[in-house]
Image: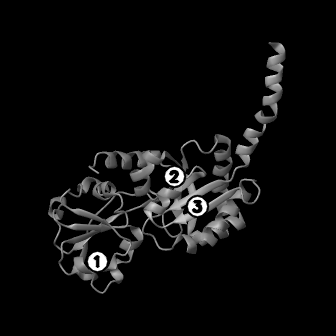
Amino acid sequence: MRSSLALLLSIAAPWAAPWPAAAAERPVALVACAPGYPGTTAEAQPSMDAFAAALSRAAGWPAGRVTAAYHETEQGGLARLATPDAALALVPLPFLLQHGERLKLSPRLQVQSKGAELTEVWSLVARRGQVGSPAALDGFTVVSLAGYSPAFVRSALGSWGRIPEGARVVHSGQVLSALRKAAGGEKVALLLDGAQAAALPTLPFAADLETVARSAPLPAAFVCTVGNRLAAARWKALEKAFLALPSIPEGAAAMEGLRFARFAPVDAAALAAARRAFAGTPR
């Protein structure tokens, strides 16, 4: 019996040690997905490569240990996040609420874009005088960059009220034509992000539009781990790297290429409030 056990141990020993080392050396794939935002996977790749290289170096890892890719479509991002090597996700709040449970996304850091805040205020815009309450939106088309998550669009405005089920929610990042329709009196409203709302006064037909309601400040975007694909020790190294990037010349340059300002701890209370509102809205 003893000799059999010794034989088994001698066979197992060469295979036992390399597994942890191999896991620690496996590349970490970061998948950024922002449906409807400008740019394509191919156009963003040089900037994503620079960001991945800076993150690897800031973590004290060899070149190539982190890879990164951007997907501008919801389906493209979902397909990439379904692959086993996708261990990190960088996604906006509506994507997290819509897909986070199924993909097992755990928010670890918030993302602040350059010229913006850690939070985003969403604005409901319609023809002046046309929408006085949520009920008035019945029969409307509501266009939004976040339209791939209808429950987010319906729940985002908090105390103003939920957009009714009788309104059709449409996903689009190209909102100019929808704004023209709204200004012309068609039954169209828009839920705009902060940058889009800030540009409204520059439109020649801006006087025909009004901001009907605004959301509370909501978390803008997150870095998430995906399921259990990343060991705790590896995330700890990456967390320090993310937080340190703005103070490292290579990191600052890489973040500039992606228009990132900084990463910060998650505002757990704000995220919990957004999740409660989302959970209470029919999907």
Cα distance between the residues tagged 1 and 3 = 32 Å
Q: Give residue 52's position: percent from left, percent from top.
A: 66, 62
* Nearest to the observer: residue 108 or residue 14: 14
Q: Amino acid at mark 3?
A: Arg
Q: State left or right for residue 260 relative to residue 215.
A: right
Going from N to C along the chain, the mark reached first, 1 or 3, is: 1
Q: The N terminus appears in which quarter of the rendering?
A: top right
The circle drawn on residue 179 is 1
Tell me, yes or no, whether the two marked residues, 1 and 3, touch with CB atoms within 8 Å.
no
To which residue does mark 2 refer?
Answer: 82
Q: Amino acid at mark 2?
A: Ala
Cα distance between the residues tagged 3 and 2 = 27 Å
Q: Is residue 65 visible?
A: yes
Q: Amino acid at mark 1?
A: Leu
The circle drawn on residue 85 is none
To which residue does mark 3 refer?
Answer: 262
User: Residue visible at 25% across and 82% down?
Assistant: 207
- The relative height of residue 264 versus residue 7 in the rendered view (above or below) is below
Q: Give residue 126's position: percent from left, percent from top.
A: 23, 72
Q: Give residue 213's position: percent from left, percent from top.
A: 27, 64
Q: Give residue 217's position: percent from left, percent from top.
A: 39, 58
Q: State left or right for residue 191 relative to residue 3.
A: left
In this view, the mark in front (1 or 3): 1
